[in-house]
Image (cartoon, rainbow, N blue to C red):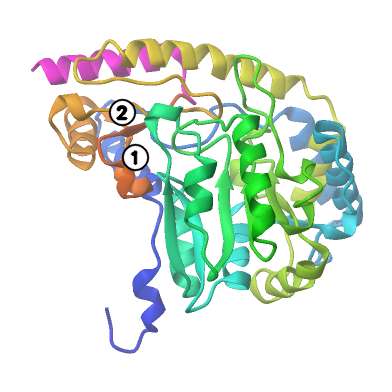
C-alpha cells in the first residue's frame, strides 16, 4: 500500500460477488456460456408502475436536492408500511431514506465503533459488516451461524460474547449468504438476555423480511418494546421490489441517534436522488402483486435447487427459510470453497460465491443465488455434476 494512504484503508474489505460478476461477464464476452448463480439480485424487472412514477417525477421537475433524510411523504409511507407489516408505530421523523442498505451499516459502525470498543456480527455474514466494523476502529467479534441450526443464530452464544466493550450487535434475518431465518423463540431469548446490557444497541438488517417460506412470519426487532429504543432497523426496496440498481433503502433510528446519522448523510451523500424517492413511494403505496408473485417464484426455485444440490456427490444442503440463497456444504468434494468457486466458473461456466467471502466460518460452503430461472438452475447443476465426475 502506498505510504501516503491512511492506515485504515488497509482494513477496508470488499464484496467478492462483484469480482465474480466481473469475471463472469468477461468470460461471457469472450464467448463462454455462463450461468450466473452468484450475484444477489432478483432477476425480475422493477414493476412498471414504479418505473413510471420515477419517469413522471423527472418530467414533473423533481431534479433538485431533497432533505438529507428524504422527502417527507416517503418517510411517512415507510412508517405506514412498517405499521401494516409489523404492527409497530414508527415516528416518520426517525426514518431516514438511504442510497441502498450499505450506508446504514457503515453509519451505524462509525457512530458506535472506535478503538477500544467491540461490535458483534454474524459469520458467515454479509461481508460489509466486518469491513465496516474494522474501518470504524472497533474490534470485530464474530458469532457463528451453524448449519446444524439452519444457520439461525444461537442467542446463548451471542449473549456470551457481549462484554463491557460491546457497543453494537449486527443481526440479519432472513440472512445473506445462508438463507437462514431465526425462529421467534431464539429472538425472544436474545431480547430477554439483553436486559442485562442496556447500553448495547442493535443493527437489525431486515432487507429480506418479505422473503420467507413454509409459513414462516418475519419477527422484527422493532416489535419488542423493551429494546425498541436501541434498535436501528435496515430495510429497503432493492430485494422486495427488484430495485437493486435504483439504490434506495431506508433505516429507522433511535431518536437520540438520528441526528448523528443525518449529519453523516449530509457529509456523505447529501440526499438520495429525488426521482428514485418518488418511485419508492409508488412501490409502497401501489399494488403488491409483483412482490407476491416474485416470492412465489423464488419459493418454487428454492425447492428445485435444494433438491438438485443434494444430488451432487460431496454436497449437502439444508433448506433455506428465507431470502434467495442456498448455502450447501461442499466438504465432501475434498476441495476448498475458493478453489471450487474458481473451478466451477472457469471449467463449468457456473458462477457461485465461495463461503469464505462471507467470513472464516464460511469455509466448506458455497453460496448459490436462485435468482435465476429454473431451467438455468437445473442446467447449472448438470454442469457441476459433469465436472466433478470428470
Judging depth in this view, the residue of 260 and 195 nearest the camera is: 195
N-terminal label among 1 and 2: 1
Q: Residue at x 63, y 21 (%)?
A: 294
Q: Residue at x 65, y 21 (%)?
A: 216
For mark 1, what is the residue? 25
Question: Dot 1, how many residues are within 10 Å of its Cα: few (below 14), some (14-19), or many (20+)?
Answer: some
For mark 2, what is the residue? 34
Q: From this viewpoint, which residue is outermost toward the left?
A: 390
Is 130 on the left or on the right of 45, as rendered?
A: left
Is 16 on the left or on the right of 120, as rendered?
A: left
Judging depth in this view, the residue of 176 and 266 nearest the camera is: 176
- 27 above or below 254? above
**Cα distance in 3D space between marks 1 and 2:** 8 Å
Q: Which residues fall within the magenta stretch?
A: 371-390
Dividing the picture into quarters, in which one does residue 317 lie?
A: top left
Marks 1/2 in contact by CB < 8 Å: the verdict is yes
- 273 above or below 39? below
Question: Dot 2, how many residues are within 10 Å of its Cα: few (below 14), some (14-19), or many (20+)?
Answer: many
Q: From this viewpoint, which residue is outermost toward the bottom?
A: 4
Tally of numbered discs: 2
Magenta stretch: includes residue 126: no
Judging depth in this view, the residue of 36 and 92 nearest the camera is: 92
Quadrant that contains the N terminus: bottom left
For the residue labelled by badge 1, is the local secondary structure a helix, a strand or a loop?
helix
Dividing the picture into quarters, in which one does residue 252 lie?
A: bottom right
Quadrant that contains the C terminus: top left
Residue 140 in percent (x, y) is at 43, 63
Residue 144 in percent (x, y) is at 41, 44
Q: Residue at x 49, y 26 (%)?
A: 371
Amino acid at each position: 500500500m502506498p505510504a501516503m494512504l491512511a492506515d485504515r484503508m488497509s482494513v477496508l474489505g470488499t464484496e467478492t460477488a462483484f469480482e465474480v460478476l466481473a469475471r463472469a461477464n468477461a468470460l461471457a464476452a469472450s464467448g463462454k456460456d455462463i450461468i450466473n448463480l452468484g450475484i444477489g439480485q432478483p432477476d425480475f424487472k422493477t414493476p412498471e408502475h414504479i418505473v413510471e412514477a420515477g419517469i413522471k417525477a423527472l418530467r414533473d421537475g423533481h431534479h433538485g436536492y431533497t432533505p438529507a433524510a428524504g422527502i417527507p411523504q416517503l418517510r411517512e409511507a415507510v412508517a405506514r408500511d412498517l405499521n401494516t407489516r409489523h404492527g409497530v408505530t414508527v415516528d416518520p421523523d426517525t426514518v431516514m431514506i438511504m442510497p441502498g442498505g450499505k450506508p446504514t451499516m457503515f453509519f451505524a459502525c462509525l457512530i458506535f465503533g472506535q478503538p477500544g470498543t467491540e461490535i458483534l456480527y454474524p459469520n458467515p455474514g454479509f461481508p460489509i459488516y466486518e469491513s465496516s466494523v474494522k474501518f470504524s476502529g472497533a474490534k470485530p467479534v464474530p458469532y457463528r451461524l451453524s448449519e446444524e441450526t439452519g444457520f439461525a443464530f444461537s442467542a446463548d452464544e451471542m449473549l456470551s460474547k457481549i462484554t463491557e466493550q460491546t457497543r453494537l450487535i449486527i443481526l440479519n434475518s432472513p440472512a445473506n449468504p445462508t438463507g437462514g431465518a431465526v425462529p421467534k423463540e431464539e429472538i425472544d431469548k436474545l431480547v430477554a438476555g439483553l436486559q442485562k446490557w442496556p447500553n448495547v444497541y442493535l443493527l437489525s438488517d431486515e432487507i429480506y423480511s418479505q422473503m420467507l417460506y413454509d409459513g414462516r412470519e418475519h419477527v422484527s426487532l422493532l416489535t419488542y418494546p423493551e429494546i425498541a429504543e436501541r434498535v436501528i432497523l435496515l430495510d429497503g426496496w432493492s430485494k422486495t421490489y427488484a430495485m437493486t440498481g435504483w439504490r434506495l433503502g431506508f433505516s429507522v433510528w433511535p431518536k437520540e441517534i438520528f441526528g448523528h446519522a443525518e449529519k453523516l448523510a449530509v457529509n456523505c451523500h447529501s440526499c438520495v436522488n429525488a426521482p428514485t424517492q418518488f418511485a419508492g413511494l409508488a412501490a409502497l403505496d401501489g399494488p403488491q402483486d409483483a412482490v407476491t408473485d416474485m416470492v412465489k417464484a423464488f419459493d418454487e426455485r428454492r425447492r428445485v435447487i435444494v433438491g438438485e444440490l443434494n444430488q451432487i456427490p460431496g454436497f449437502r444442503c439444508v433448506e433455506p427459510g428465507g431470502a434467495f440463497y442456498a448455502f450447501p456444504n461442499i466438504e465432501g468434494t475434498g476441495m476448498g470453497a475458493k478453489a471450487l468457486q474458481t473451478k466451477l466458473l472457469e471449467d463449468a461456466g457456473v458462477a457461485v460465491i465461495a463461503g469464505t467471502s462471507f467470513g472464516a466460518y464460511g469455509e466448506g460452503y458455497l453460496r448459490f443465488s436462485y435468482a435465476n430461472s429454473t431451467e438455468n438452475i437445473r442446467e447449472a447443476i448438470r454442469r457441476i455434476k459433469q465436472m466433478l465426475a470428470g
